[in-house]
Amino acid sequence: MLDEDADMKGTETIVRFGRGVELESLVRLASGLPNFMWFDGGNNASSLLVWGQGSVVLDSQLWKEEIRSSLRKPQTLNTDKKRLFTGGVAGIWGYEFGARCEVMPTQLKARPHPDLFLRRYEGGLTYEHSSGEFVAAGSDDFVMAALKIVRQAKSSEVRRGVASASTHVESPDDAEFVDGVSRILDKISAGDCYQVNLSRRIVFTAPTEPLESYLKLREHHPAEMGAFISMPSGYVLSNSPELFLKIEDGTVETRPIKGTRPRTGSEEEDAAALSELEASEKEIAELTMIADLARNDLSRIAIPGSVCCEPRRVFELPTLFHADQRITCSLRDSLDVVDVIEATFPPASVTGAPKVQAMKTIHELEPVSRGIYTGAIGWLSDSGDAQLSVAIRTLSVQGESAHLHLGSGIVADSDPYCELDESKWKGAAIINAITDS
């Protein structure tokens, strides 16, 4: 028997399941349910699984009204130590959706997925990594469905698929990327901008079993802000390490990343790379500029004087070192999550400074739309809480094609060939996972 502990919270049911169910087995079963989405916390943070037949928010023109009408204030707020998703909306915001939030050029070229795709869900199944427990919360119907899927995963062997080899069929020329970096350096020298995030797109044949490719990716390179999203237009596989927004109890947090070094597995080489990243004046300056931009974005919705910026931090992933900075503020009482998104989108770290001028340069130099890349992936809870990642290291799958964008931030002392190398470091893990290399 499963250890099941049910609790009634107003109209919301919360059931905590005992240990003994493997996350991957449960995910394989749940992925067959309607409109499955998985917000994956990797090996260190909680994961959220949702499914259901809820209404969809697609209209970028009326997005604020549609989201607010989709979110419902619960009769009783969940006061558990770790807040639970008991209902809300979840999905993606593409980079080009930013034209609804900021002054930016509109990219008219086709994109694999809608600029906005959010679906209403009546509950969520949370996997708490620290305890190995699952917690179902939401409507009675959702919790009963979660109970059924957990029991099934515990009592039967779940079929494992195969992570198919996806052949690389196209890549923009390295020389074009290097030339783009040089053109940005000219703009910086002329005083037009201080930093620009430049990217390029790689095209693959689509993996035949996207979930298995994602599971292979997370096995070798887990990320705390990962995601597997299924939509009518296809799939999104994200290996993002970057938090765009977290809202909890009226506190807003963002954590931009700037600065990357590869890890080789050699203790000596990794120590040298880590020391170099920690001391790099170029990388420190790059993150300082973006942190300042993020502080400015948060100031639009913050209680005056509440914006705080923590010191720069260098952290490690299985194949990379990164540097980031945590910035927080207290949200003004009259505002909500929709106001926060409108004030901060697109994410500061993947545009540049000044933000509007950087987006104009991106539009000028990048020949294709970004789509989900450098947009956001996440959920908005009925409680007012939210969590969104920056959609980097993210593969968009539609039909027989899969698109992966890779980029880097360009500043005055950037070396074009080093920036090219950095973009390749960032894509290595996901390319290895989907090409079976």
Image (cartoon, rainbow, N blue to C red):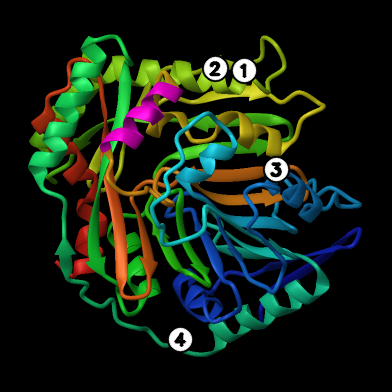
Circle 2 packing at 10 Å, graded few (<14), some (14-19), many (20+), is some
Mark 2 lies on residue: 296
Image-quadrant location for residue 330 = top right
> Would you say residue 433 is visible in this rendering?
yes
Q: Which mark is residue 385?
A: 3
Q: Residue at x 39, y 69 (%)?
A: 398
Query: Magenta stretch mostly in which secondary structure?
Result: helix
Is the residue 312 above or below the residue 234 in the image? above
Of mark 3 and mark 1, the one earlier in the sequence is 1
Q: Position of residue 256 (x, y in %)?
A: 43, 30
Q: Earlier in the sequence, mark 3 or mark 2?
A: 2
| Residue 151 picture quarter | bottom right
Identity, as a three-letter code, of the amino acid under mark 4? Val
User: Residue 409, percent across and down?
Assistant: 28, 29
Check disc 1 and report the residue beneath it.
299
Q: Is the N terminus in the top left, top right, bottom left or bottom right quadrant?
A: bottom right
Between label 2 and label 4, give the one nearer the viewer.
2
Q: Nearer the viewer, mark 4 or mark 1?
A: 1
Amino acid type for the residue under numbered disc 1: Ser
120 left or right of 77? Answer: left
Task: Assess whether residue 362 is covered by the magenta stretch.
Answer: yes
- Cα separation, mark 3 vs mark 1, equals 19 Å
58 relative to 229 in the view: left or right? right
Where residue 367 sits, quadrant-wise, is: top left
In the rendered structure, which disc, 4 or 1, sits on the residue that comes first in sequence?
4
Label 1 Cα neighbours within 10 Å, binned few <14 / some 14-19 / many ≥20: many
Determine the secondary structure under disc 1: helix
Quadrant in which the C terminus is drawn: bottom left
Measured Cα–Cα span from mark 4 to mark 3: 33 Å
